[in-house]
Image: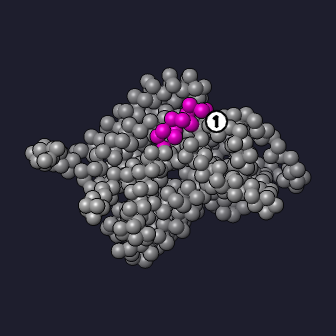
Amino acid sequence: MRLIPDRLRSRFEAAVASTSFPLLLTVIAVLIAAACSFLIYPEVAGSLNNRITTDRYDELALGLLHNGTLSFYPDTQPTVLRAPLYPILLAALFALGQQLIPFSVQLFQALLHGVTCLLAYQIAKRLAGTARAPLAALLCAVHPYLLWYTGRMVIESVSVFVFTLIVYCVVRLSSRPTPLHAVWTGLAIAAGVLCKSTYLPFIVAIPLLLLISHPRRIPLPHVAIALSLSLVAIAPWIIRNHAVSGQWGIVQALTGYNFYVGDRFAERYPGSPFSYAVIIARTDFTKMDEGLPEDIQKAGGARREVLQDEWLLSRSIERYQREPGFLIAKVAANALMFWTLGSTPLVSLLTMALQLPLLFFFVRAAARQMKNKGLLCTDCIPVWLIILYFGIHLPVYALARFSVVFIPTMVAYAFLPRPISDRRR
């Protein structure tokens, strides 16, 4: 006996197939995000003492506006400690009038949330089918962890959008290889790199996965377009960073700092497994300068940032060589922190309640997909991107907020239908 009559089922499918339905989903997502940012977030954030968290991105935006370069305003010295995408977007919003802050930022991020849900719909439509795609998009639209970041002046909303955009472009290029789709894929990869240096490995990994995927390998010319365009798009930023620091190949000189912070978190995690605010309070970050060579101390501006970052990285590597057991313990701790560690015990518990069940359903669906279609099937490329992004954090530094970028993609995979052969067992 059918639970849904054929007439209602056909009407639903017709409505979903209409061109206006994805637009309706996007509008709903934007309205939900705006309501949460303007009405709910101020109340919740006020009680959590979290309302003015900006990670200094507001200073970077003001530096762009007033100094004409990426700098921590009012300091006029150029910095290479951040990638430029989010500061540029904030600077454009600040230019509309600082009296509109934070509302213009929250509205922009609500719009970005809507587009992200639209991308999740398109990904789920290609992977799970038209009937399941609206459910995936609606779940993203109301997902509390996604909505939490739309109200804050931090990079997560943009990073969620960029990761989902990369996945969408890869899925579309895999299903229909064309030069134009290759162009969009290259631009999406570049946007990721200019958002966070964590996306740097995607420049090589995505072209490689596209070349070895099956049953359809993407033609080499299309892969070459994506690869070359991503490199060309980030080249101006690399050149700029060389001009201000004297070092080539710098997107974001924060690797050594993140290793240092990650080491401190790994040391203190057993004593505070549910609150990184406690770990931060117990860490004296001024000790980063202890033993700093004199030539680095005398260097100024971006040059010092690069040299100190390299020095911090070398100190961490030397420790791992002396204490390989610590590195193993750090990797294990980061694997847990990536999915569970929030600022307070309450936030950590809520994060685990949201992320761990989704992780379970995603892993189950991804494993089933790999079993039935092969480890290197085109539908599995986004799974490998998630594994890569997750793996990059393990030896470095991890918090639960870093896992938020996966949510739309994981939701789309969680709605994958079981193969008929599995259903008959």
Q: Residue at x 55, y 46 (%)?
A: 339
Q: Along the line of sight, which residue is nearer the eye, 45 or 6?
A: 6
Picture coordinates of residue 247, whole percent (x, y):
72, 61
Q: Residue at x 51, y 30 (%)?
A: 102
Above or below 273: residue 247: below
Picture coordinates of residue 321, whole percent (x, y):
79, 63
Above or below 194: residue 145: above
Q: Secondary structure at mark 1?
A: loop
Q: Along the line of sight, which residue is nearer the eye, 186 or 328?
A: 328
Query: In this picture, which residue range is highlighted in magenta?
Result: 344-355
Pointer 1 residue: 275
Q: Residue at x 35, y 67 (%)?
A: 372
Q: Residue at x 44, y 55 (%)?
A: 363
Picture coordinates of residue 43, whole percent (x, y):
50, 22
Quarter placement of the C terminus: bottom left
Residue 106 appearing in the image: yes
